Image (cartoon, rainbow, N blue to C red):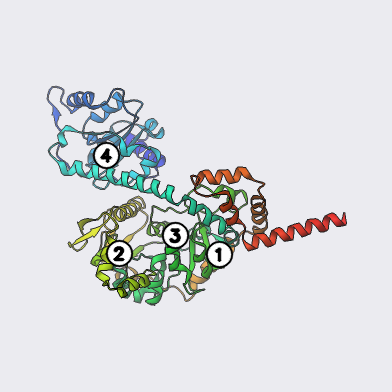
Amino acid sequence: MRSPFDTNLEALARRFGHALVLTDQDSTPAAAVDPALGIPGIGAGGEWLQQLVPDPPPDVICAVGLCRDLSVDALLDAAPASRVVLLEPNPADARRALERRPWKDRIDAGQLAVLVGPGYAGLAAVARVMPGIGTAPVLVHPTLSGHPGLVGRAREALARLVFQNDANAAARRALSGRYLVHSLVNAPALARESDVARLGNLFAGRPAVIAAAGPSLDRNLHDVACVLDRAVIIACDTAAWPMHSGGATPHVIVGVDASEANARHLSSYPAGKSVLVAEASLHPTALAPFAGRTFFFRVSDHEPWPWFASLGLDRGQLAAWGSVATTALALALDMGCNPIVFIGADFAFTDDRPYCRGTAFESTWASWARNGEGYDAVWKCLIGRWQTTEVTDLAGTPVRTAPHLLSFRDWIVERAIERTDRVFVNATGAGLLTGGPIRQGSAVRTLHPTPAFEPDAIARALRTAHAAGLTPNAVSPLLASATSVVAGADEALIQRWRTFADGTVSRDAIRAALASPEQQAWALGASAYRRLMEASA
């Protein structure tokens, strides 16, 4: 018979897609024992919960430290219909609670989740199943009242979640129109290029280096120079030019930001040097240098992907937690890479700079500097756009960062905790990428024992995968459907797209996005063919 612990742990992983990592080590003060009953906290738990749980109980309740005694049982009995998130500072207490009784039914129904400190990894995954966590009441076990640091970390995790959700919602409202229009403009390229799903396990067991464009990349380039032939080099789009200019041309570049400014990192990139793994909403100018070398992916199932799928153009999905670095990690995991080494992944404004040198932003910085501003002043202005906070970096030095950067860092740490089958090494040497199983080390020591790839082996494997992922005869059905929309014959589809974009995109803009020269040529050819058939009938 399976133990309650195993049953609960499997149910949590299945329901929330997050593997809970627990230890037997106690890391918080001992729970109070009810002297009358000799049972930890049952009497006190019942009393304080009765006072704090609203009547009627809310839809979602967050509770800190209740796993340390039977207070968790009292809460679940007092709020049987509520969705409960248990944030437990002490992993050993969480283990004991999960060992005590089976909660599989409640977990399977999405009514109970357990997260452990100090990082509370998996909170974002739980929030996707249990919306409303960020605004739910937070109940704190009375025995933690004298330990504000423990409670504070749980509240900080919830605060980060609120920030992430608000930022994602704001981005959704602000960018949905651009996302839609760019995806429609890029539709012919999507039909001609490959599917990211073809990269699955392509480099299983081989190392990957993920290059982000943090300030430390300037010196990291020299650190990895002698081991570039031992790993698949994956560059975030912002890091592509610095890597190439530094003699470390990436095998794969990942692009997810749909802005025109971000497209400058790709639109001038040397043709034929790297393959591009691209979200379909990239600015169209970003795709030109990568014709015949692009793998498309999606980040969700929203518009216009249902239309693409109906035409046989569905593509594999990669996670995009607001940052191209998170998507690059998702790609490395999908490709089976191990170990995964990060460089330039500061997630902080190291040296009071927003990026490394040599990005597409360099020309903008230079123009501002020519107008009398020094580079330090330019960087200070750029960093000042964010609400910054000062924290201690890996070297014990104060460094400024921002909530969105911490959010990206936390997402990567969560993936590292979940993927116990992989090794994660931060070779940045600065910044804030730490936590969970992420090791701090150099790229040379990590990769030097690995046999070198044969010359051209990576490029050859990518070419083969690209060819295997092409969709034969996909262009004609796409152009036929686009022509129908341009002609006004599919108003329901246009209305669906406008609803997705919150009305920010007009019907004319949608038709203009689809009315490419290629579509117009196809429409003229189709019209001439119909007339010819009619004349010969």
Quarter of the image where the C terminus is located: bottom right
Marks 3 and 1: which is nearer the front?
Answer: 3
| Residue at 29% in and 70% down | 445
Please state which amino acid type lies under the numbered disc 3.
Ser
- Earlier along the polypeptide chain: callout 4 or callout 2? 4
User: Which residue of the protein is positioned furthest toward the right in this rendering?
Assistant: 537
- Is the residue marked by circle 1 packed among few (<14), some (14-19), or many (20+) residues within 10 Å? many
Please state which amino acid type lies under the numbered disc 4.
Leu
Q: Mark 1 points at which residue?
A: 466
Query: Which x, y percent locates residue 323?
Result: 38, 56
| Residue at 45% in and 60% down | 335
Q: Name the residue under label 4.
A: 87
Quarter of the image where the N terminus is located: top left
Q: How far separated are the C-alphas under marks 3 and 1?
A: 26 Å
Q: How far separated are the C-alphas under marks 1 and 4?
A: 44 Å
Numbered disc 2: secondary structure: loop
Query: Which x, y percent locates residue 114?
Result: 31, 38
Query: Which x, y percent locates residue 404?
Result: 32, 53
Q: Residue 259 carries which label?
A: 3
Q: Mark 2 points at which residue?
A: 354
Instruction: Note whether residue 64 is visible.
Output: yes
Q: How far separated are the C-alphas under marks 2 and 1?
A: 34 Å
Query: Which x, y percent locates residue 189?
Result: 58, 62
Q: Which quadrant of the figure has residue 166?
A: top left
- Earlier along the polypeptide chain: callout 3 or callout 1? 3
Please state which amino acid type lies under the numbered disc 2.
Pro
Query: As rendered, which of 271 and 443 lies closer to the eye?
Result: 271
- Earlier along the polypeptide chain: callout 2 or callout 3? 3
